[in-house]
Amino acid sequence: MVTPRRFLPSVPSLQALEAVARLGSATAAAEELSLTQGAVSRQLKSLEDQLGAVLFNRTGKRLVLTQAGEAYVTEIRAALHQIAQASLKLQTNPGGGAVNLAILPTFGMRWLVPRLPQFASAHPDVTINMATRMEPFNFATQPFDAAITFGNGDWPDCQKLWLSTENVIPVALPDLLCDHPVTSGHDLLKLPLLHIQHRPRAWQKWFAVNGVETGPLPGMTYDQFPTIVQAALHGLGVALLPDFLVAQELAEGRLEIALDGPEQSLGDYWLVWPDTRRNDPALSAFRDWLAEIVGDEDLLPR
């Protein structure tokens, strides 16, 4: 049965409501939606009239959601994302086979992308749309079918597939190690250490596992893995990096492992998808393909 039209507000009015709720003002919502403030206000008034409910309390120029408004926004936000997701899939693959995937930028580019030609060859009818995300995300409010994430893969109302364990290794320019031979962890302390911003204690943990007690460790700090790799390639110091990230540089001899030691893992990479997408044919094909390659091959990229 088709829902009566009186219960179906216009999409522009719902977009206006969602934007005002998220941004906190009609002015900010108007700027985002490329409308005038007056147009946004009229959309909200029309929506309230149609629903017969007060969605905002108006205090001067401030708009504060009522309790009913908050509940309604939560539901329509998910619906708007679902419409956007369906539209994107239709545009990118009219046959219906598409997966909208959130990826971590470094792992996605260095581990997943080199393998995707295999998937494209085996499943030419399925399109993989990728968007990089560093911040936490919510499947209920963002247009993703699945995500590649780091940690324990413990997402509520989701299923998961293990992809890879991240082991970190100290690497440096061969010339730097030739000029300053390293035979122990104490020798490494004499060299400049390069740090990654979002893992400020990684070096201290590595030294502890290797039996070297340290205090705070000075050194240059970088906010992204590609930048710290370049710093190591230019001889600025020793970097503690995931093995998959520098596999090619090690194979080509542009970097060397500064000191062999106990393997140290900082966590795992997972493919995670919501329970509501578990029977999606395109996602199932992608998931099954990933399960095959992580079970059948060496995880380091070639």
Image: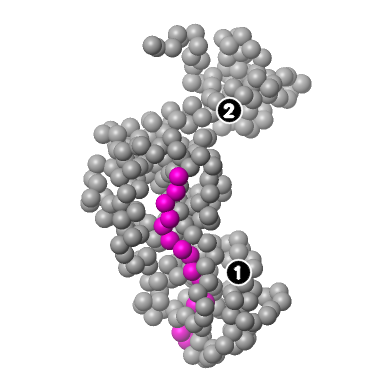
Q: Which mark is residue 269?
A: none
Residue 258 drawn above or below residue 84: below
Labels 2 & 1 near each other (Cβ < 8 A): no
Residue 211 position in % (x across, y down): 62, 82
At 45% from the left and 38% from the top, the residue drawn is 275
Q: Which mark is residue 202?
A: 1
47 on left or right of 6:
right
Q: Main secondary structure of the magenta part?
A: strand
Mark 2 or 1 closer to N-term? 2
Q: For residue 284, which quarter of the picture? A: top left
Residue 63 drawn above or below residue 146: above
Residue 266 position in % (x across, y down): 54, 65
At 36% from the left and 76% from the top, the residue drawn is 251
Front-lying residue, 233 or 76: 76
Amino acid type assigned to the residue bearing label 2 in the image: Thr
Residue 260 position in % (x across, y down): 49, 82
At 47% from the left and 86% from the top, the residue drawn is 175
Q: For residue 52, which quarter of the picture? A: top right
Label 2 crowd bin: few (<14), some (14–19), many (20+), radius 10 Å = some
In reply to whether residue 168 is colored magenta, the answer given is yes
Magenta span: 159-175
Q: Secondary structure at mark 1?
A: helix
Where is mark 2, residue-wise?
74
Amino acid type assigned to the residue bearing label 1 in the image: Ala
- Quick one: quadrant of the C terminus? bottom left
Q: Secondary structure at mark 2?
A: helix
Gap between marks 2 and 1, in whole Å? 39 Å
Count every numbered label the image shows and give the total: 2
Label 1 crowd bin: few (<14), some (14–19), many (20+), radius 10 Å = some
Residue 160 drawn above or below residue 252: above
